[in-house]
Amino acid sequence: MAEAQLKPRTLPYVSAITEGVRAVMLEQPTAFVAGEDVAGAGGVYGYYAGILDEFGPERVYDTPISEEGIVGLGVGSAAAGCRPIIDMMFMDFLGECMDEVANQMAKMRYMFGGRTKLPITMLTMAGAGMSLAAQHSQSLEAWICHLPGLKVVMPTTPYDAKGLIIAAARDDNPVIVVLNKMSLAIKGEVPEESYEIPLGKANIVRPGTNYTIVAMGRMMHEAIKAADELAKLGVDAEIIDPRTLQPFDTDTVVESVRKTHRALIVHEAVRFGGFGGEIVAQIQEEAFDYLDAPIARVGAPFSPVPFSPALEKLYIPNADNIVAAAKKQLGL
Amino acid sequence: MAEAQLKPRTLPYVSAITEGVRAVMLEQPTAFVAGEDVAGAGGVYGYYAGILDEFGPERVYDTPISEEGIVGLGVGSAAAGCRPIIDMMFMDFLGECMDEVANQMAKMRYMFGGRTKLPITMLTMAGAGMSLAAQHSQSLEAWICHLPGLKVVMPTTPYDAKGLIIAAARDDNPVIVVLNKMSLAIKGEVPEESYEIPLGKANIVRPGTNYTIVAMGRMMHEAIKAADELAKLGVDAEIIDPRTLQPFDTDTVVESVRKTHRALIVHEAVRFGGFGGEIVAQIQEEAFDYLDAPIARVGAPFSPVPFSPALEKLYIPNADNIVAAAKKQLGL
Amino acid sequence: MSTQISNDTLIDMHRRMVRIRLFEETAGKMMEDGKIPGALHLYVGEEAVAGGVMVHLSDEDQITSTHRGHGHLIAKGGEFDQMFAELYGRSTGYCKGKGGSMHISNMELGILGANGIVGGGPPIAMGAAFGNKFLKNNKVAVCFFGDGASNEGSFHEAANMAGLYKLPVVFVCENNGFGEYTPQANHQAIVDVADRAAGYGMPGVIVDGMDAVAVYEAAGEAVDRARSGKGPTLLECKTYRFFDHVGVRGMGLTYRSDEEVERWKKRDPILLMEERLLEQKVLSAEQIKAVHDITSEEVLAGIKFAEESPFPDPSSLTEDVYA
Amino acid sequence: MSTQISNDTLIDMHRRMVRIRLFEETAGKMMEDGKIPGALHLYVGEEAVAGGVMVHLSDEDQITSTHRGHGHLIAKGGEFDQMFAELYGRSTGYCKGKGGSMHISNMELGILGANGIVGGGPPIAMGAAFGNKFLKNNKVAVCFFGDGASNEGSFHEAANMAGLYKLPVVFVCENNGFGEYTPQANHQAIVDVADRAAGYGMPGVIVDGMDAVAVYEAAGEAVDRARSGKGPTLLECKTYRFFDHVGVRGMGLTYRSDEEVERWKKRDPILLMEERLLEQKVLSAEQIKAVHDITSEEVLAGIKFAEESPFPDPSSLTEDVYA
Ligand SMILES: Cc1ncc(C[n+]2csc(CCOP(=O)(O)OP(=O)(O)O)c2C)c(N)n1
Ligand SMILES: Cc1ncc(C[n+]2csc(CCOP(=O)(O)OP(=O)(O)O)c2C)c(N)n1
Ligand SMILES: [Mg+2]
Ligand SMILES: [Mg+2]
C-alpha cells in the first residue's frame, strides 16, 4: 500500500489513467467498467483504450446515454456486491445525475444506519481549454465536495492519476476522480506496479519558505510556472497540490502557511462560491495569527465558459494570473 | 419600486409567499404557476392556496413528477415570452434537474451571446427540522450560487418573502427563491401593496458595534436569539441578513466588519464547502487589517441530515451553537 | 401456474397482507398522535401488491421500495420491532434512527431502501440486477414504483437499460391512480403505465392489484422470466390507497370523492383474500381471526419495543457517513 | 397531402439541403485544418430531415436543435456569414463567439439553440410549446433529437408533459443508428424509437429519413396536428450520418463498416432529391448545378466574412451573463 517507485517509465496522463483502471481490473475481481462509449471506443479521450480487449465484454460495458441510469448502475451493483468503475464522460454531465450522486450514492450508507457500503469509483473529465464551450468545460468540484458521504480526488500528474484511481477503487466509499482534459498529454514517471496515493494526503509539489500556493488540478502546473517567475522576485513559493479535496488535508496546508505567512488558492472553477472559499476559511481559522496578508484566490471569472478561444484563454486562470495575484497580495 | 410600508398587517411567512405569488400574477399578465401539486392542492405547504381559484386553470398548472421537465417548461416558455413561476417542491429535488438549472437555465443567455432573456422565478423549500430525513431537508444554495447566470435569494421574514418574490419575478433573469419550511409559521408585518426588496441588497437586521454576524435564511432568527445572549456578555452584535446570495452584497458586510472587527457566518447548510466559505474569503480579502480574530463559521456537521429528532436537533445549527462559536472566537 | 396456487401460499400471502394492514393502521395513528415524527406514507389498500409479489422472492433477492415503503419491507420479512423503532427514531431501528420511514431498509432481507425520491428506486434496482447478472448469483431485483414515478426520467433510463442488458429485474408499478393529490389523468396522457413497456423491449402486463392471487400469478411469471435470463417485465398493478397521501386523514383535500374511496374499499384486498380463504376452506373464520389477533399483539409489542428503546447517542450523529 | 407537393416546395427543400451539405463539408474541412476550434458534429447525410421538416415552419415557429445543429439552423434560414463567424469564434457570429457550434442559435429565427447536452432540447421545446399555447400565438415548436438522446430521462419527461398538455410540439427523432460510436442495438432494446410514442399518448410515425418528400409529408401532418391543437407527434426519421461522429474523418474507429456507409450513401438524400427533380422535370441539370454553385460561393463568402471578422473583445468575457 506504500507509494511505490518500482520501474517507473515516462507516460502521459492519459495512459496513466488507463494503467490505473487496468490495475483495478486486475486486482478487483468484481470490478467492471461502465459508461458511454467506454468499451468499443475506449472512451472519447481514449483512456480506456485496450480495456475491452483485455477484459472482455463481461467486464466492460457501453451504456446508453443515460447519466442517471449509469450512476444508478453503480449504486445498485455496488449494493449487490460489485466494485464498479463508472464513467461520467464530462463533469458537466453531473447535472444529469445529481440526484443519483447526491441523494442516493452519497447518502445511502448513512440513511441505512451504516448497514451498507458502496465501493464505487467514478471517473469524470473536467476543465476548459479545448473550445468546447459552456457545457463541456466546467469544474464543478464545489458541488460534490459539499456532500457528506463522497470522497473527491483530483489528480494532476500521471503518477497521481494512476495511484489515486487505484486508491479510489480500493476504498469502500464512493470516490469521484476528477480528471482534466488539458492534462491528457502531460508526461511524468509512472511505476509499472500497482500502487496507491493515500486518499486525504496533500502533496508538497515544490517546497518553499515564504509563500504558500494551494493549487488544485491542472492549476498545479500553472502554479509551478508562476513560482519560477515569483522566484525572480525573491518569493520562494511552496506549492501544495491537495490531490484529495474530500477529505481535505487541512494540516499540510495550515502547516505551510504557519511557515510562510501568506497563501494563495488557485482553482480553475469559477472563483465565486468555489472550493477556494473553504480553503481560505480553514486557513484563517487555523493560522490567523500567522497571516501577514489576506489570503488571495485565483479562479475563473463569473461567467459560463466562453467558446471563442480568444475569450476562453482569458477565462482560464494561468501562471500570469497567479503571478499577478501574488504580486498584488505582496505589494510587489 | 421602493420598499413600501403601506397598510402592513401581521401575516405568517406562508401567507406572505402566497401574497407575493398573487401580486406577481396580478401584475404580470404572462406569469403562470407550474409545479407538482401547486394547483389542486395549493402546494404541499399550502403557499399557493387560493391561487388556482383566483387565476384559474389557464394560469396554474399541476405538473407530472418530472423535475427536469418542470424546469424545462420554465426555460422554454420564458424563451417563448412568458414569465413563469415554477415550483421545486423541495430544494433536495434540484438533483433531479440540475442539468436544466445549471446547463440550460443559467447559461442560455450567455451561450446565445445575450440574445435571449429568461425571466424565470423558481420557488423551492429548503431546510431541516421536520424529521423529513436526508432527502427532504437539505440546504443546497452552495450549488446554485456558484453558477453564473442565476440569482439566488433567501427570504427570512414574511416581509422579505413577499418583496423578494415580487422582485424576483420582475427581474429579467432566472431567480431561485430559497424558502424555509420551518419558517412557515413565523409572523411579521406585510404591506398589502405590491412592493419589492431590491435584489442584491443585504439587510442589517440588528445594528451593533463590536461583532458582526452574517446569518443566512432561517439562521437569522437564531442569530437574533444568540445576540440577546451575547449582549449579556457585552457583545453588541450587528446581524446582517444577506437576503440575496447572488449577487452578494459584499459592501454591507465588509463595512460592518470594518466597524466591528470580528465576524461570524452562519448557515444551515453543511459547513464544509458551504456558502460561508465564500463570505469568509471576501471579508478577509476586503477587511483583513480590521480583523481582530479569525472569522468563525457555524454550519451543519459533515453528515447527511438524520431522521431521528434526537439527532436532527443536534444537527441543525441554533442560537446555542452561535453563542458557543462567538464565545470561543472571542475567548469568553 | 394459475391453477397451482397452494393453500400454504394463500395463507402466506394473507398473513403478509394482514401484517401490513395492522402495522400501517397503528403507525398512522401514532403519527397523527404525534408519537412518530416526520411524514408517513401508508400502504393500506395496496397490500395485495406487496403480498402477491414478495412470496416469490427469497431473502437473497433484492427490492427497491418507495416513500410508501413499509408494506414492502413487511411483506419481505421486516420485523415490527425494528421497524417501529426506526419510525420512532430510536437507535434500535433498522437504520439506527437515521433513516426513518422514507429510508427504512434492511440489507439482510435484500431491501435496498425505501426512498424519499420519487423515481429513486428504478436506477438502483436496475443496478442491483446488473450486479446480480455480473456476479451470476441468480438473484432477482424487484423495483416497486408508483404511477407518478413513471413520469420521472430516472424510470425511463433504468427501464431502457434493463431491457437492453436483459437484466433480472421486475418493475412493479403500483398504479393507485394518484401522485400525491394529482389524479393520473392530470399527470400522464395514458391510462396504462404498462403501455410504456414496449418502448423498452419488455413485456407489459396489467393485473388487478386488489387481487393478491392475480398479482401472485403475474409476478410469478415475471420473476421466473427474470431469473431464467429472459429479461425484465413491467407489471402494472391497478390499486388504490385507502388513506391519504400522507398519514391517515391527510390534508382534507377534495382531490377524490368519498364515493370513489368507498367503491374501492368494496374491493379491499384483504377482504377479497379472506372471502377466498373461507370459500375455498383454506382457513376458517377463527383461524383468520387468529392471524389478526397474533399480528395485533405483535404490533403492540413492536410499539412497546420502540417506545422503550433509547434515542440514538449524540455521538452517532456523524457516524456511518463513511465506511 | 402526399400528392400535393408543389414544385416550389421541392425546389425549396433541395436548396436547403444543398446549403446544409456544402456548409458542412467546408466546416468539417476547416475544423480538420485547425481553423475552426472545438468539436463539430456534422449533419451530412441527414439533410432530408431538416429540409423536409423546416419547410413547414415560419420564422416564428421555434425549434430546439442538438449538438449536430448546423443543418437545423441552415434549413430554418440561418445565414452562412454569422454561422461561420460563430464557428470561428468571432464577435460577428450569431452568439458573438460565445456559443460556438454546440450552442449556435438565432432567436429571430426561433432557434432556441443547438445544445451540448444530449437530451437538452426536449424539455426546452416542450416548454416553448407550453408558452405558445399559453400565449395563444399559434406557433409550433419542433424538437430534433437523436436515437441516443431518446434514452435520456429528459426526453421522457418532456414527451410525457407534451402528451399530457396536448402541446403544439413535434418530436423529430433523427435515428441515425448510433449514439457516438455505439450502435442502436447496444443502447436500446428496440428498433423503432417511435414505439415510445404510445407511452406518452401521442402518435408515433416512422419515415424514410433519406427521402425529403417522405419527411415532408409526415412532418406536414405532425405540424398541422400540433398547430390545430391536437397535440404532439413523435416522428422518427431513419437516417444515417456520412461523416464521423465528430468532424469528417473522426477517430478511425471501426464501429461501422465501410460497406455499411457505402450502402447508405447510395441513398444520399440529395442524390435522391436531385433524381426526383430531374425525373419530374422540376429542375434541369444546369439549374441544379447552379444551386450548388451559388451555394459554394456563399460558403466562400461566409468563410471570408468569418476570417475577416474580429475576435470578441476581452471586455465581452463577462458580458451577457445577466440581462
Ligand atoms: C423527486 C421527487 N419529486 C417529488 C416528490 C414529492 N412526492 C412525494 S410522494 C409523491 C407522489 C408519488 O406518486 P406515486 O409515484 O404515484 O406514488 P404513490 O404516492 O401514489 O404511492 C410526490 C410528488 C419526491 N418525494 N421526490
Ligand atoms: C448529457 C450528455 N451525455 C453525453 C454526451 C456526449 N455525447 C455527445 S453526442 C453523443 C451521441 C448522441 O447520440 P444521438 O442522440 O443519437 O445523436 P447523433 O450524434 O447520432 O446525431 C454523446 C453521447 C453529451 N453531450 N451530453
Ligand atoms: Mg400513485
Ligand atoms: Mg444517433
Image: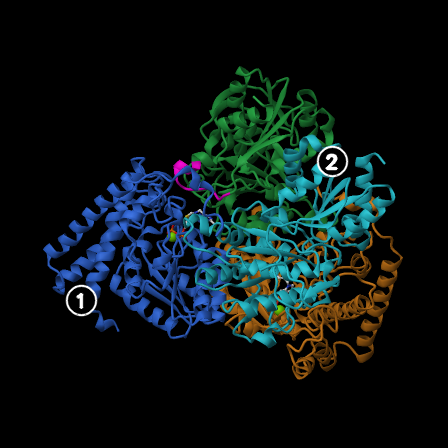
Chain colours: A green, B cyan, C orange, D blue
**Is C162 rendered above or below residue D214?**
above
Q: Main secondary structure of the magenta part?
A: loop
> Which is in the foreground here, disc 1 or disc 2?
2
Q: Residues within 10 Å of mark 1 (few under 14, many from 20)?
A: some
Label of residue D7 in the image: 1
Observer able to see residue B83: yes
Assess mark 2: CB under 8 A from ligand 1?
Answer: no
The disc numbered 2 marks a residue on which chain?
Answer: B
Q: Is residue B224 left or right of residue C164?
A: right
Quadrant assignment for ligand 1: bottom right
Whether the magenta-drawn stretch holds residue B280 is answered as no
Label of residue C219 in the image: none
Q: Secondary structure at mark 1?
A: helix
CA gap between label 1 and label 2 equals: 80 Å
Q: Position of residue B169 (x, y in %)?
A: 55, 61
The disc numbered 1 marks a residue on which chain?
Answer: D
Q: Nearer the viewer, residue B189 or C151?
A: B189
The quarter of the image holding the N terminus of chain B is: bottom right
Q: Is residue C302 left or right of residue A130?
A: right
> Disc 1 residue type?
Asn
Whether the magenta-drawn stretch holds residue A306 is answered as yes
Instruction: Place residue B80 in its image quadrant.
Output: bottom left
Q: Residues within 10 Å of mark 2 (few under 14, many from 20)?
A: many
Q: Nearer the viewer, residue A26 or D272?
A: D272
Q: Secondary structure at mark 2?
A: loop
Observer able to see residue B62: no
- Look at the image and give the residue range highlighted in magenta: A303-312
In the picture of the structure, the residue carrying the numbered disc 2 is B261
